[in-house]
Image (tube, helix red, strand yellow):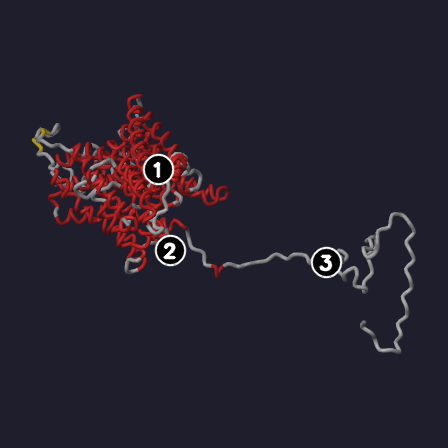
Amino acid sequence: MEFIAQNMAPIMFASLILFMLIGYPVAFSLAANGLMFFFIGVLLTPYSGGAINLAWPLLYALPDNFYGSRVMSNDTLLAIPFFTFMGIVLERSGMAEDLLDTIGQLFGPVRGGLAYAVIFVGALLAATTGVVAASVIAMGLISLPIMLRYGYDRRVASGVIAASGTLAQIIPPSLVLIVLADQLGRSVGDMYAGALIPGLVLTGLYTLYIVIMSIVRPKSMPALPLEARTLGHGVVSLLIALIAAIAIAYAAYRYLVPAHGDNADILGATVGVIFIYIVAILDRSLNINMMSRLAQQVVIVLIPPLALIFLVLGTIFLGIATPTEGGAMGAVGALAMAAMKGRLSMDVIKQALASTTRLSSFVLFILIGARVFSLTFYGVNGQIWVEHLLTSLPGGEVGFLIGVNILVFFLAFFLDFFELAFIIVPLLAPAADKLGIDLIWFGVLLGVNMQTSFMHPPFGFALFYLRSVASRVPYLDRLTGKQIAPVTTGQIYWGAVPFVCIQVIMIGLTIAFPQMVMRYKGTAVDSGTIDYTVPEVPSLSPLGAPEGGGAPANSGAATTAPGTPDLSQPPNFGDAPPAKPAAPAPDLSQPPSFN
């Protein structure tokens, strides 16, 4: 009994892992585990030697935990339903389909062009939707049949689709970054700013892998045949339009600098983008044909999602809006984009609301279960056990980071990112803070690591999403009439392996180059270059001295200024002032007396 009482924390943690491995729902596993060990802990308190601090009245703290600032009254978590609703509306509006078709045509002449298009569109969807499921399913439905039609290797095609969809994990406005910021007690805006560069670097690594594969195995990703390039040529026209937009933006910047200062660059870029968008719309509507069809399509399709990205992320980074307000504006912007495309209907809104409610309830129940678990876990000093376990790892800060990332990587085989964020992160954060690790950097590092939870077999959710939309049986292609072989589960799993390795490399790069994240703090200021100037302050007269300086009133050496009352005498209320007695003349024939 004494052994169990004094080792309640590791037993409780191991029991939680066992609960979840059995397949019991995570939210109920957390709550049931917490309540069960609370009852056991109260009974074993006399045998614990002070290691357990549980009592029945402590259960009264649960309602406050549920309705307090950590769960029901948490303004930060309001961003989750907003961004979820925005992503689902955009996915239903056909934005992903338009983007994939247009970018695929743009990169079509290049070997591996469709793979580049999937990565580029995955990054754009990540920056607009923030929902992995929406990105993977949309790209799987649209791009996978096209890639198989033109002879792409099934492992490459499935791997690049699943990996590009998981960019929504790390590129803002990511849902996991919101949860991590909440659990670490840090600003969501800082977390977004810190994750932006690592997300773009990871996108570049995916692109580099495709470049290498297109050279090493060119037959695995052929270029689009000429008959498939329905938009024709027009890259030169697109470059001219881009140069014109840059010129207009620069001219607007120079005009706005005197009045708007630092914001003139953003306003100038906005003017340039709006100008080229209006030109493309008029060119298409009036059949002027000043721009090529490809240039028209690229401008018209790309600018609305880029404007939405600016509406959400730009306002957050500029400090105009909080992440919750940015999410609300993004949801309204998504509705406006769907309406502009003529695809906003009551059915789309119902589907978006249902999916948003389902995901938000899922997060809320996990968070409530986590509060029950943590109440008991902290009552048995579990946080001290975890802190001692992690801070005693060899290698100091680097050893801690390596050990923690290995732990999270293997737990990600069985848990998804919400479960990891609500269960593991609150246990790791105090130890990281004690070692002096910046928690924004630590959160971004964990976000990159948790991305693997979507990718590695056998429980990668991105692989499940792709499996649900990939054909399981042979089918006839609607354009070529040829029979297309199905995509097997093994091909999906093997296609994900190289991208999991790339994600692991990205974890190492984030540890090795923390400045990718630490730029969120802005430019460091060297205190040695600061010039301290103290303004001159007029000297104050001593107490009792006349204004403007001079000796104190009772010094015996100075006269009182005219109009200044003599505070050495009692107040006079109109009577004649008493005559002052004459001072006796000093006897200079005797030595002075000090008595």
Q: Nearer the viewer, mark 3 or mark 2?
A: 2
Q: Nearer the viewer, mark 3 or mark 1?
A: 3
Q: Which residue is mark 1?
A: 309
Amino acid type shown at disc 3: Ser
Residue 131: percent from the left, percent from the top? 28, 36
Instruction: Answer with left or right where residue 474 lies relative to residue 269.
Output: left
| Structural distance between the alpha carbons of marks 3 and 1 | 62 Å
Please tell me which residue lies in front, 97 or 17: 17
Tag 3 secondary structure: loop
Q: Quadrant of the C terminus?
A: bottom right
How many neighbours does mark 1 have within 10 angstroms: few (below 14), some (14-19), or many (20 or more)?
many
Q: Which residue is mark 3?
A: 541
How many neighbours does mark 2 have within 10 angstroms: few (below 14), some (14-19), or many (20 or more)?
few
Tag 1 secondary structure: helix
Amino acid type shown at disc 2: Gly
Location of residue 31 by image quarter: top left
Instruction: Answer with left or right where residue 424 lies relative to residue 62.
Output: left
Residue 139: percent from the left, percent from the top? 21, 35
Residue 148: percent from the left, percent from the top? 13, 36
Tag 2 secondary structure: loop
Q: Residue at x 37, y 46 (%)?
A: 53
Residue 436 disc label: 2
Residue 192 disc label: none
